[in-house]
């Protein structure tokens, strides 16, 4: 069994048992958490316009409205057909079913990439793979935003994530404990693709 297949199995059980709540912290009101997440993303997206944007691990679309409002066209990628269909509900969006650990998008084709708690849920091998995929599909100068639970492992610290995503020096790291009701520490990494 590949690491990707193992991850799909874990998420399939979570999706089956928790439904829409699978995208959030167990026991969390996912709609309230979604509102808190959007409050942290809006300052970095509102007032900007991007030709093409992609959200890795879009779930059922908590961030879809915000992304489609600031992009000419968006691609919403996840492993669940039902979720990507809901996420890509706007006319300027395309669902992307992930059947393997590859984003089926052209190199340097995206001006914006968003990761909301997806990379944090992957083992290191898939973290490296999908970070590389986001780096591959974003063009130089693209904006990349990654919301990640603060973890002490060297592969999870913001500086390493910035390196994996190919961000230029000068990226921002915003620390917050206002994402979930448990007040767990998160970092919002915002930067420009080198």
Image: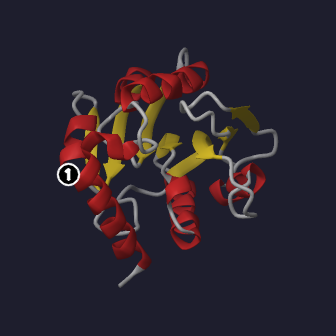
Q: Nearer the viewer, residue 192 or 81?
A: 81
Q: Nearer the viewer, residue 23 or 29?
A: 29
Check the image and name the residue furthest to the bottom.
1
Check the image and name the residue furthest to the right.
170
Q: Residue sitting at 28 percent across and 47 percent down? A: 18
> Is residue 140 shown above or below 7?
above
- Left or right for 85, reference 158: left
The location of residue 14, given as percent across then percent down, is: 31, 56
The location of residue 40, given as percent across then percent down, is: 58, 25
Give residue 61's quadrant in the image.
top left
The location of residue 194, given as percent across then percent down, is: 70, 49
Check the image and name the residue furthest to the top.
47
Quadrant location of the N terminus in the rendered image: bottom left
> Is residue 81 shown above or below 155?
above
* Residue 49 seen in the figure: no
List the residue tagged with mark 1.
Answer: 81
Q: Nearer the viewer, residue 173 or 16?
A: 16
The location of residue 19, given as percent across then percent down, is: 25, 45
Give residue 166's quadrant in the image.
bottom right
Label 1: how many residues lie within 10 Å, few (<14), some (14-19) or many (20+)? Answer: some
SS at mark 1 in the image: helix
Number of marks? 1
Q: Residue sitting at 38 percent across and 32 percent down? A: 30
> Is residue 140 shown above or below 98?
above
* Residue 105 seen in the figure: yes
- Left or right for 172, reference 105: right
Q: Nearer the viewer, residue 78 or 23?
A: 23
Q: Residue sitting at 45 percent across and 22 percent down? A: 35
Q: Residue sitting at 55 percent across and 27 percent down? A: 41
- Colouring convention used in this rendered image of the protein: secondary structure
- Left or right for 91, reference 58: left
């Amino acid at each position: 069994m590949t690491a990707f297949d193992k991850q799909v199995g874990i998420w399939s059980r979570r999706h089956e048992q928790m439904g829409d709540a699978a995208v959030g912290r167990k026991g969390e009101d996912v709609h309230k958490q979604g509102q808190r997440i959007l409050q942290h993303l809006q300052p970095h997206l509102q007032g900007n316009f991007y030709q093409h944007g992609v959200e890795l691990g879009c779930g059922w679309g908590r961030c879809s409205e915000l992304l489609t409002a600031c992009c000419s066209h968006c691609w919403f990628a996840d492993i669940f057909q039902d979720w990507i269909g809901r996420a890509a509900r706007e006319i300027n969006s395309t669902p992307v079913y992930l059947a393997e650990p590859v984003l089926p998008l052209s190199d340097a084709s995206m001006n914006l990439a968003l990761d909301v708690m997806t990379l944090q849920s992957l083992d290191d091998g898939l973290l490296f793979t999908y970070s590389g995929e986001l780096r591959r599909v974003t063009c130089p100068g693209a904006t990349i935003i990654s919301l990640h639970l603060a973890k002490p492992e060297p592969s999870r610290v913001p500086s390493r994530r910035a390196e994996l995503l190919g961000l230029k020096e000068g990226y921002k790291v915003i620390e917050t404990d206002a994402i979930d009701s448990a007040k767990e520490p998160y970092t919002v990494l915002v930067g420009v693709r080198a």
